[in-house]
């Protein structure tokens, strides 16, 4: 039977990784991005997220949310920066 070539196959999750996964999910990261950040398989990240009660958003819902954020940003007026006040040289006596 061939052995797995993945180095993290069946690697247990430590508390730090679980915490990082929670932070990634809360920030709206996709399963693919979380997997890359944690150097784990996407399926492993998705299963762990479900086990801790924080499943990733469905891809169609994530796309809808992303599109809404883009539309909101496009409708916002651009910020204009005020020109710096001109500095008058001081006269020394």
Image (cartoon, rainbow, N blue to C red):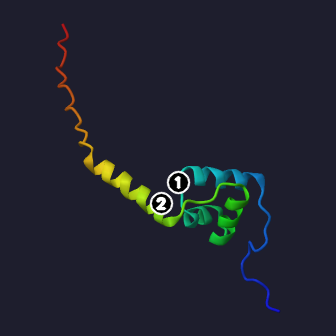
Q: Quadrant of residue 89?
A: top left
Q: Is residue 65 left or right of residue 39?
A: left
Q: CA distance from mark 1 to mark 2?
A: 8 Å
Q: Which numbered disc, 1 or 2, marks the residue closer to the eye?
A: 2
Q: Position of residue 43 (x, y in %)?
A: 65, 71
Q: Is residue 53 left or right of residue 86?
A: right
Q: Is residue 12 left or right of residue 82?
A: right
Q: Nearer the viewer, residue 14 or 59?
A: 59
Sequence-first disc among 1 and 2: 1
Q: Visible in this render: residue 41? A: no
Q: Is residue 18 above or below residue 91?
A: below
Dot 1 falls on a residue whose secondary structure is loop
Q: Residues within 10 Å of mark 1 (few under 14, many from 20)?
A: some
Q: Is residue 37 above or below residue 91?
A: below
User: Which residue corresponds to mark 2?
Assistant: 62
Dot 2 falls on a residue whose secondary structure is helix
Q: Visible in this render: residue 44? A: yes
Toward the right, the furthest residue is 1
Toward the bottom, the furthest residue is 1
Q: Quadrant of residue 29?
A: bottom right
Q: Are marks 1 and 2 in contact (CB under 8 Å)?
A: yes
Q: Give me the disc on residue 16.
A: none
User: Which residue corresponds to mark 1?
Assistant: 28
Q: Residue at x 65, y 65 (%)?
A: 46
Q: Residue at x 78, y 56 (%)?
A: 14
Which part of the image, by quadrant, shows the C terminus?
Answer: top left
């Amino acid at each position: 039977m061939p052995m797995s070539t993945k180095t993290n196959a069946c690697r247990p999750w430590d508390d730090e990784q679980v915490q990082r996964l929670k932070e990634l999910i809360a920030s709206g990261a996709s399963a693919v991005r979380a997997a890359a950040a944690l150097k784990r398989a996407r399926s492993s990240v998705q299963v762990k997220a479900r086990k801790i009660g924080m499943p990733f958003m469905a891809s169609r819902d994530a796309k809808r949310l992303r599109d809404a954020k883009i539309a909101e940003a496009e409708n916002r007026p651009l910020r204009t920066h005020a020109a710096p006040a001109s500095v008058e040289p001081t006269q020394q006596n």
